[in-house]
Image (tube, rainbow, N blue to C red):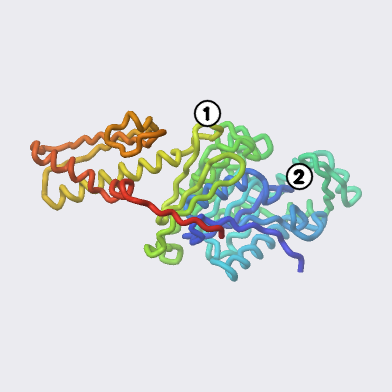
Amino acid sequence: GQNLSARLDLPLSEKPKAYALFAHCFTCSKNLNAVGNISRAMNRAGIAVLRFDFTGLGESEGDFANTNFSSNVSDLVSAAEFLTKDFTAPAIIIGHSLGGAAVLQAASHLPSVSAIVTIGAPAEPAHVKKLLGTSTQKIEVEGEAGISLAGRPFKIKKQFLDDLEKHKMRKVISGLKKALLIIHSPVDETVGIDNAGQIFEAAKHPKSFISLDHADHLLTNESDSQYVGAVIAAWAGKYLDSPMHEKKHDPADNRIIAHTGNPGYQTEINANGHTLLADEPLSVGGTNTGPTPYDLLVVGLGACTSITLRMYANRKQWPLEAIDVRLKHQKIYAKDCEECNTKDGKVDEIEREIELHGSLDEAQKQRLLEIADRCPVHRTLHSEINVKTKLK
């Protein structure tokens, strides 16, 4: 009867091709930076991610002292049922640390899941006892003990330890019958790399392993968690090709969506179902993870030029093998532009150089040069543009 708190991260298009369920690490929460980074990286690949807090943690209701590994597995199944009822059944389940052991245990109860991912997961839930150190003796004798993990106080009861011992994972892992990806750092000091080896050995194919060189257990380096998210999305794509998971983009919906979070200027873009990033250079406070908005504007001209020339040459059956278009954008003083009507201030100038490959004669090359100025984006840039803006 207790409510679990969750967050659903959707792709910019709000039309996911699949849903994933994320289980966080022991005593962590859905708001851990690494979990957010992994979710956003998967969003860029068109995958929605539901991340939730286990009972008694984060913003979920309940008393953590009364929970155990079994209740974590039950929470996972409940979260999957929520997705199934209100959205779409999860095709991917991801678990970090003890959450990784929980997704392995829960997988058999989730028929919709075709891909399982563990990140820094223990081979046996009882591994958690090592984190408790000498407190385990006090718990065994007195029935409970207050401990401090990551600077936060928690109460652990003996039933928690007893429940950990009940779960033996090897048989569960060997009977998964689902694709498994194991991600682990060889320098993980919380859950040693030998755990990944044990999980891999117990699992049947298809199974994969990714080594996170230099990463710590909580993936505190943002580049590590971003990498993990991108790898999961790429790997899982192989197991999402069935008609049940495939969702094609609606060509009638030609909106381009740009989303800029906080802090920084990194901007996620969804264009016709395709995702990319825009950013600003380090020199102006950006992180240089993508082209600038002006770069993207010029890219549109370059791509349109190249595609238009290909279309024209194909129609004429000319021996055009390839096209290279090189462009450069800059602001120049209007007085230095002989072709410009504007004579005050600065104007935008785009230099465009076209290289044509193939056995073309001079007449064909000159005709293609003329056609370049007729590409739709070129004509748009030279025509009047009306931008209508409103608040949603």
Foreground disc of the pair 2, 1:
1
On screen, residue 28 versus residue 95, left or right, reads right
**Contact? badges 2 and 1 (CB < 8 Å):** no
**Number of numbered markers:** 2
Residue at horizontal 40 percent and vertical 39 percent from the top:
295
Quarter of the image where the N terminus is located: bottom right
Q: Nearer the viewer, residue 268 or 63?
A: 268
Quadrant of residue 107 in the image?
Answer: bottom right
Q: Is residue 90 above or below residue 374?
A: below
Q: Which sits earlier in the primary sequence, circle 2 or circle 1?
A: 2
User: Label 2: which residue?
Assistant: 129
Q: Secondary structure at mark 1?
A: helix
User: Label 1: which residue?
Assistant: 283
Q: Which mark, residue 137?
A: none
Q: Nearer the viewer, residue 143 or 89?
A: 89
Residue at horizontal 13 percent and vertical 43 percent from the top:
367
Residue at horizontal 49 percent and vertical 45 percent from the top:
231
Quarter of the image where the C terminus is located: bottom right
As shown in the figure, which amino acid type bears the numbered disc 1? Ser
Q: Secondary structure at mark 2?
A: helix
What x and y, as percent, mark residue 35?
62, 47
As shown in the figure, which amino acid type bears the numbered disc 2? Lys
Find the residue positioned furthest to the bottom.
85
On screen, residue 139 versus residue 4, left or right, reads right
Q: Nearer the viewer, residue 328 or 72?
A: 328
What x and y, as percent, mark residue 77?
64, 63
**Residue 176 visible in image:** no
